[in-house]
Amino acid sequence: MGRAMKHRADLTRAHVLTGLVLLAGSWAGAEVGTEGYPPVYEHWVSYTTEQGLPDDHVYWVEVDRVRGDRVWLGTDNGLVSLSFADHALTTWGPDGGLGHQAVMSVEVEPTTGDVWVATFGGLSWLSGGRVVRNFTQVNSGLANDVVYSVVSLDGEVWAATTAGTSRFNPRTGEWKIYSALNMPTDENWCYNLTAGDGKVFIAAWGGGIIEYDKAGDHFRHYLDPDNEFEIELFPNDGLVHNITTSPSYDSGLLWATTYFGLSVYDFRRWRSYFDHDSGLASNFINLGRARPGTHTGWICTDKGLSALNFDTKRWVTYKPDPEHHGAGIVELWDGSEQVEVRRTATGIAHNFVLSVDFDGDDIWVGTSHGLSHGTLEQTVEADRKGGQSR
């Protein structure tokens, strides 16, 4: 157990865009109202290694809803805690007991506040600010050391690995492994997890979405029913594709992302969305996350961040402006029609978006080149950084 290394984020004033030809609020075409749209963020601050991150690759973003004072980051070079108050950074790596430097997912257990970390070298358990245990396939019931995702449900911890999903009860020490041997899938490579309402949803690589109901101790399996690998043969018939990258469940909706498009299920019928018939930035989706208490899903793609209001079918898509460093582009879509394009002085750090989470009205976005913090209004944080930080 090593000592956590502390870094103070460099919050010196960044260089303001020369000329500011992209003033926030400028747009192409007439302004439209935003009623029925997901939140429109025009103020962004980004963090990279220049501000103290151990690595620009931010695989995971997890707002700490227990402490309410920080956001946890899974990076390619360790676990990071970023303080809301003073933007101080604390990092943990293998020298501090972490299983591996590559951190793919983070979960804050809501009853204890303990932090569970999915790494490429096992499942790490942080309590009291230090790594108290690293579980591997040798010293525990973890199915495999390569852990992609971790969630908690009713005090139990679930970990998705390349050899199945493991379920751990920290109070009793009991482990259970779910694989093709005892759950309805032919694929053991489990890629991502979500939990809610007494259920755990598993995204299996090539195996669709698997739902586990804790009360009934039974599974339900969702697949692409047309069995066409290259195309979506019958629209809205089920999952877009069996190669799924993430599930997200909230407020009665199941969001399922793939590398071929987006599927949403209201437990009566499926809806499919693609980049050619909606505001979705790209069919290549890394992750989807529902905003708690809403019917809005935030979709992380290789070409930007898209948000869909499921009830109104209205989209907002965020991209960096390729022609102006640090600036952004915001697209508003009504169904398949693009109705407005806004150019903002600041934008998300990179178009390759990996993760997203929410803190009240604020949003945190992990990309392949830094972390971005979006607010609805200009903040002191942005003022101190000169309005942009890349």
Image (cartoon, rainbow, N blue to C red):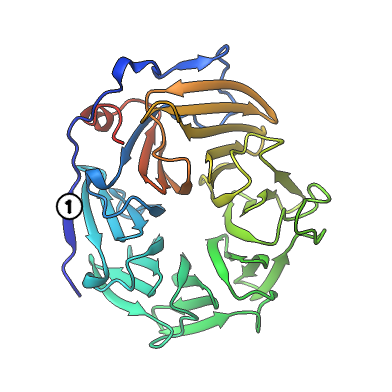
In this image, 235 relative to 186: left or right?
right
Q: State the residue at coordinates (37%, 66%).
A: 117
Looking at the rendered structure, the number of numbered marks drawn on it comes to: 1
Which corner quadrant holds the C terminus?
A: top left
On the question of residue 109 being in view, the answer is: no
Location of residue 90 (image quadrant): bottom left
In this image, 380 relative to 38: left or right?
left
Location of residue 193 (image quadrant): bottom right
Q: State the residue at coordinates (65%, 67%).
A: 210
- Of all residues shown, which one is farthest toward the bottom? 138
Q: Secondary structure at mark 1?
A: strand
In this image, 292 relative to 21: left or right?
right
Q: State the residue at coordinates (68%, 50%).
A: 263
In this image, 184 relative to 136: left or right?
right
Q: Position of residue 63 (x, y in %)?
A: 37, 50
Q: Position of residue 327 (x, y in %)?
A: 39, 27
User: Above or below — where is 7 with respect to 312?
Assistant: below
Q: Position of residue 33 (x, y in %)?
A: 57, 18
**Residue that numbered label 1 is attached to:** 7
Which corner quadrant holds the N terminus?
A: bottom left
User: Above or below — where is 176 with respect to 7?
Assistant: below
Mark 1 nearby-residue class (10 Å; few <14, some 14–19, many ≥20) = some
In the image, 296 versus 226, the foreground residue is: 226
Q: Amino acid at mark 1?
A: His
User: Above or below — where is 13 with respect to 273?
Assistant: above
In the image, 195 versus 371, the foreground residue is: 371
On the question of residue 49 being in view, the answer is: yes
Q: Position of residue 115 (x, y in %)?
A: 34, 65
